[in-house]
Amino acid sequence: MAGFLKKWFRFAPDRKGKEAELDPGKMPRHVAIIMDGNGRWARSRGLPRAAGHRAGVEALRDIVRACVDWGIPILTVYAFSTENWKRPQEEVKGLMNLLVEYMRRELPELKQEGVQVRAIGRLEALPPEARRELERAWRETAGNRRLILNLALNYGGRAELVDACREISHKVLAGELRPEDINDDVLKKALYTGDLPDPDLLIRPSGEMRLSNFLLWQLAYTELWFTDIYWPDFRRENLRQALLDYQQRERRFGGLKI
Ligand code: IPE
Ligand code: IPE
Ligand code: MG
């Protein structure tokens, strides 16, 4: 099929609906999501928090697929923060088990869809089984190019900056870098996301309006989008709304409108 036809077909189902159309030429290159509200979703249904986390995985499945369908090349999702260890041990254990289960169950389909799985955070502190599954997914999907799915696990923006400072300091001590040569670019490259562009759009569901230590450096000029719905209820129609709003935004990066 000719390239332009293929492109049209990809968006064709959307054209039938009454909804506004996404502009394929204005898609974000990188979308970041803070997957929040699982606990409250569960409580509102009289269910245990674990049921909320489980339902949150279904939302992630749908959103990964939407990114593949709509040609969004990078999706970074906040799954577990450096602060989330403060939660009851049972919940932490449940989340780690869910991660292992997710990787095992989803890997074949992720592979089929051309998804490259990666992770950012202090991964060495994750339970061995979770690390093993992540490494396997990482290795087996390394050649995929349709979507980079970047899982933030034991991730903290401050920890990331501390780790970057350490890495740079080692280079300075080894005589590979002079302090006066440290600039934005050197720091950016020392981050876990060193080879990725900054997110264009950040989505946080569940009504909270804070960053909770997510991608502190990278979000400097990111467009922010909030919704009250809880993450387990978030589906591609919600993503579509976020993208439509994003496409109306005027990004100035400190400059002036031309
Ligand atoms: C997000 O949902 C999942 C993680 C932080 C791991 P929460 O568990 O924070 O849900 P709420 O915020 O309590 O509703
Ligand atoms: C942020 O949500 C972390 C994740 C979604 C993984 P939290 O629920 O941990 O954030 P706070 O505590 O409300 O700021
Ligand atoms: Mg929360």
Image (cartoon, rainbow, N blue to C red):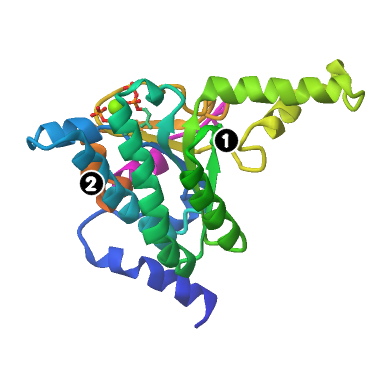
Q: Which residue sits at x=34%, y=46%?
A: 98
The residue mark sitting in front, 1 or 2, is: 1
Q: Earlier in the sequence, mark 1 or mark 2?
A: 2
- Quadrant of image for the C terminus: top right
Q: Nearer the viewer, residue 68 or 111?
A: 111
Q: Is residue 72 magenta?
A: no
Residue 170 appears left or right of 135: right
In the rendered image, the residue lying farthest to the bottom is: 1
Q: For the residue marked with disc 1, what is the amino acid?
A: Glu
Q: Is residue 149 above or below residue 105?
A: above
Q: For the residue marked with disc 2, what is the amino acid?
A: Ala
Q: Which residue sits at x=33%, y=42%?
A: 242
Q: Nearer the viewer, residue 229 or 155?
A: 155
Q: Which percent across, then down, holds residue 252?
A: 54, 29
Q: Which percent across, then down, holds residue 162?
A: 63, 19
- Residue 95's label in the rendered image is none
In the rendered image, the residue lying farthest to the top is: 180
Q: Which residue sits at x=21%, y=32%?
A: 39
Q: Which residue is mark 2?
A: 55
Residue 106 appears left or right of 140: left
